[in-house]
Image (cartoon, helix red, strand yellow):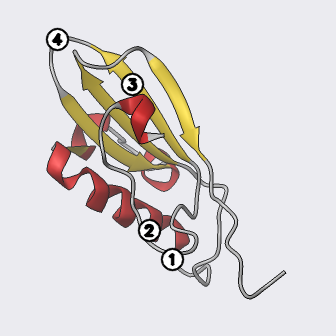
Amino acid sequence: MESVVGRTFLPKGQNTVTRCPIVIRLVRDVHEAFYVWNEIDQHQSGFKKRNFKTDERNLTDKIKASQTALLAGKNKGLTSDKVMVEIISPDVVNLTVVDLPGLGMAGKI
């Protein structure tokens, strides 16, 4: 996924790290900007994307925090609620991709 985007920003670790779909929207523009929000944020009254602006070095942490907010009270399982990431840059092509939760294995098959 990151090779398509051309940046390293997705959370990494052992077992299942992606616990909800992450919708990654790439927008080609002369300016550079990064945004991260989730469906809970989006449904709040007065939602404005500009309030969820971040910088590239904090992108991974913002994605983790957004996933955690979606999973609060759900026993850290998986959810179909989405995290949205928007990367605006002159170095990307206009494209939307979705990183889906993977399957983790416990024990031998």
Report the residue marked by disc 1. Answer: 72
Residue 101 image offset from top left, x and y in percent: 63, 57
Label 4 – label 2 distance at C-alpha: 32 Å
Kind of residue sitting beneath label 4 = Val
Q: Earlier in the sequence, mark 4 or mark 2?
A: 4
Q: Which of labels 4 and 2 is toward the front?
A: 4
Kind of residue sitting beneath label 2 = Ala
Report the residue marked by disc 3. Answer: 26
> Label 1: how many residues lie within 10 Å, few (<14), some (14-19) or many (20+)?
few
> Label 2: how many residues lie within 10 Å, few (<14), some (14-19) or many (20+)?
some
Residue located 37% across and 56% down the image: 63
Q: Are marks 4 and 2 in contact (CB under 8 Å)?
A: no
Q: Earlier in the sequence, mark 1 or mark 4?
A: 4
Q: Which of labels 1 and 4 is toward the front?
A: 4
Label 1 – label 4 distance at C-alpha: 37 Å
> Label 3: how many residues lie within 10 Å, few (<14), some (14-19) or many (20+)?
many
Residue located 54% across and 71% down the image: 71
Query: Looking at the image, which is closer to me, 61 or 2?
Result: 2
Report the residue marked by disc 4. Answer: 30
Q: Which mark is residue 6?
A: none
Q: Please tell me whether mark 1 sits on a helix, a strand or a loop.
A: loop
Label 3 – label 2 distance at C-alpha: 23 Å
Q: Please tell me whether mark 2 sits on a helix, a strand or a loop.
A: helix
Kind of residue sitting beneath label 3 = Leu
Report the residue marked by disc 2. Answer: 69
Residue located 67% across and 56% down the image: 80
Label 1 – label 3 distance at C-alpha: 28 Å
> Label 4: how many residues lie within 10 Å, few (<14), some (14-19) or many (20+)?
few
Residue 106 image offset from top left, x and y in percent: 71, 84
Q: Are marks 2 and 1 in contact (CB under 8 Å)?
A: yes
